[in-house]
């Protein structure tokens, strides 16, 4: 019971962060309510966050207030010792490891002495001692439930609660929305071009509206067309900020968006279109440092759309470097790729590249193309993990991997396009090899659409990730609400899909396409989602 009280305070401190300077993600409004076994807990003590490491530090004195754990501080060697449940933890300032029952364990951040207050890293402690935690985004409520505390295994197997943007526990579902910047679809609006204040106001309002529906994560398109919504050493500024590619908008939109997102207790995933160079073939208005001008030999024109050729190793490495620029310079919670690999219609004139870079290894171009994407996914995942292993890496492929008629292990569908055969996305290999942290198949069909039925596809994908470390988030299509396609005549379709997902423990969240479609509120989807997620 006493140890439980300590955990109540520990979790409370990380979630109730007051406004501080701009180096710390702040929680300034809509304070989170905490309930322990149904009883509300309150505290005015807060931790701080080490931005570069994304680690939340909590006061050591919290432990001393608990009768269930003994704490000592040795000034001479600046070492904190915590003894509980036959476990002894020793942590010293400026040391990136701790001693747990005599064994060395790596720390994300060392103990700090801040003006006489000894601060310890939350993640490390929460992995050793913890509570069952559930999170309700709509009411901003954390429900803590006491249980057996294990000394060597974390109770929370989900994203560690070390930054405000991360979900409090694995029992919480991710509820995400894609935010498109291309064509000014979701943000910023065409009416806010070159208007910094208006763009910022629009984004804050967008977050507020999404939160009102129960959304806790955004997947923002940061590289829409081989350009960027942030200052980059590799690619030009996106034209969707100012109307002209390469023109500085006068601020760093990505830094602003991440800070605002984390203030609201939401996750921020940086969404990249890796191989799309430009949505049309016009290059006269592209900036001088756009890839189509710097490396025209990397570009393939497929039906008047420009692609970066995945078959060129140097091009793949350049894209990885561009993505890693964001990983290294920004506190994103995830790196997210959509299904823009090879065009789905198969029209992609890369015969010369195939002849040059195949070296007889693959009998068919299709096999070679899949290997190109496999290498890219594998190397990008390794790069992210080596730099910031806490950053999640995920991909949202087309919703059908292969039809059963072509492959007996495929889904019971009759899709005209499949990820494996048309986009050359070998998602099964990515999952089985553990190259990605999560997969978000775009299952954009209803429960009554027989050629690609929602329930059949969810069960198929759940089976694919079963017994792996890859999380499954389902991509939904509220943009179809009110259309004539089967099943989209009521907003209840989305709710039925969410309810269907609950029978699969592998499904750990949902992502909706896109922000503008939810905000338009077709068939009352906003109220329906808000009601469902607030239960």
Image (tube, helix red, strand yellow):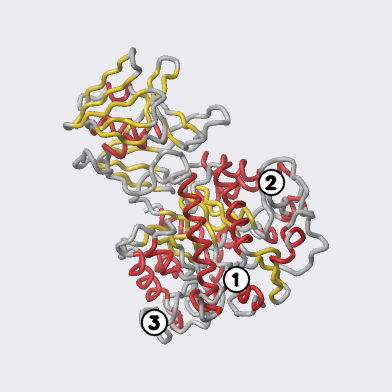
Total residue callouts? 3
| Tag 3 secondary structure | loop
What residue is shown with label 2?
Answer: 233
| Tag 1 secondary structure | helix
Q: Could you say which disc has been placed on residue 103 in the image? A: none
33 or 123, which lies in front?
123
Whichever of labels 2 and 1 marks the residue nearer the N terminus, that label is 2
275 left or right of 35?
Answer: right
Please state the horizontal and vertical placement of residue 340, each as a whole percent of the image. 58, 67
| Tag 2 secondary structure | loop
Q: Where on the picture, by quarter, is residue 10?
A: top left
Residues packed near mark 1 inside 10 Å, few (<14), some (14 to 19) or many (20 plus): few
Whichever of labels 3 and 1 marks the residue nearer the N terminus, that label is 1
Q: CA distance from mark 2 to mark 3?
A: 46 Å
What residue is shown with label 3?
Answer: 412
- The answer to whether residue 391 is visible is yes
Whichever of labels 2 and 3 marks the residue nearer the N terminus, that label is 2
- The answer to whether residue 212 is visible is no
Q: CA distance from mark 2 to mark 1?
A: 28 Å
Residue at 63% over, 73% down: 356
Of all residues, the one furthest to the left in this rendering is 86
Residue at 25% over, 34% down: 103
66 left or right of 248?
Answer: left
Q: Where on the picture, by quarter, is residue 274?
A: bottom right
Q: Quadrant of the N terminus?
A: top left
Q: CA distance from mark 3 to mark 1?
A: 36 Å
What residue is shown with label 1?
Answer: 357
Please state the horizontal and vertical placement of residue 97, each as a whole percent of the image. 35, 32
């Amino acid at each position: 019971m006493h140890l439980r009280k300590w955990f109540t305070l520990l979790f409370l401190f990380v979630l109730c962060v007051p406004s501080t300077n701009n180096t710390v993600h702040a929680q300034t409004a809509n304070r989170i309510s905490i309930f322990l076994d149904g009883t509300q807990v309150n505290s005015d003590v807060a931790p701080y966050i080490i931005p570069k490491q994304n680690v939340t530090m909590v006061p050591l004195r919290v432990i001393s207030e608990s009768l269930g754990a003994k704490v000592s501080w040795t000034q001479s060697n600046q070492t904190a010792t915590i003894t509980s449940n036959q476990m002894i933890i020793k942590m010293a300032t400026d040391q990136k490891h701790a001693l747990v029952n005599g064994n060395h364990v790596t720390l994300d951040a060392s103990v700090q002495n801040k003006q006489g207050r000894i601060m310890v890293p939350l993640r490390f402690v929460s992995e050793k001692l913890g509570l069952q935690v559930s999170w309700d985004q709509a009411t901003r409520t954390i429900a803590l439930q006491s249980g057996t505390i294990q000394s060597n295994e974390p109770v929370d197997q989900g994203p560690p609660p070390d930054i405000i943007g991360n979900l409090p526990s694995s029992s919480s579902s991710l509820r995400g929305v894609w935010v498109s910047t291309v064509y000014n679809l979701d943000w910023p609006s065409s009416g806010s071009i070159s208007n910094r204040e208006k763009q910022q106001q629009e984004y804050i309002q967008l977050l507020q509206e999404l939160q009102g529906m129960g959304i806790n994560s955004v997947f923002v398109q940061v590289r829409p067309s081989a350009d960027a919504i942030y200052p980059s050493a590799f690619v030009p500024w996106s034209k969707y900020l100012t109307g002209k590619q390469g023109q500085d908008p006068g601020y760093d939109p990505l830094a602003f968006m991440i800070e605002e997102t984390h203030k609201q207790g939401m996750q921020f995933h940086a969404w990249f279109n890796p191989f799309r160079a430009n949505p049309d073939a016009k290059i006269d208005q592209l900036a001088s440092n756009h890839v189509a001008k710097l490396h025209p030999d990397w570009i393939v024109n497929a039906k008047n759309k420009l692609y970066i050729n995945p078959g060129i190793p140097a091009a793949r490495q350049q894209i990885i470097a561009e993505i890693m620029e964001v990983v290294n310079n920004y506190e994103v919670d995830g790196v997210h790729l959509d299904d823009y690999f090879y065009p789905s219609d198969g029209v992609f004139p890369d015969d010369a590249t195939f002849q040059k870079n195949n070296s007889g290894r693959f009998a068919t171009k299709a096999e070679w193309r899949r290997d190109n994407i496999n290498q890219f996914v594998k190397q990008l995942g390794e790069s992210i993990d080596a730099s910031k292993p806490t950053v999640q890496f995920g991909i949202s492929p087309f919703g059908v991997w292969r039809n059963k008629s072509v492959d007996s292990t495929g889904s019971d569908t009759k899709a005209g396009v499949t990820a494996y055969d048309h986009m050359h996305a070998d998602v099964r290999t990515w999952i089985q090899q553990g190259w990605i942290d999560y997969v978000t198949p775009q299952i954009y069909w209803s429960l009554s659409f027989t050629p690609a039925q929602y329930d059949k596809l969810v069960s198929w994908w759940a089976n694919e990730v079963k017994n792996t470390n890859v999380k499954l988030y389902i991509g939904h299509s509220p943009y179809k609400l009110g259309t004539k396609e089967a099943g989209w005549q009521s907003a209840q379709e989305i709710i039925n899909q969410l309810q269907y997902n609950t029978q699969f423990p592998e499904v750990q969240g949902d992502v909706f396409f896109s922000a503008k479609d939810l905000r338009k509120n077709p068939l009352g989807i906003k109220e329906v989602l808000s009601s469902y997620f607030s239960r």
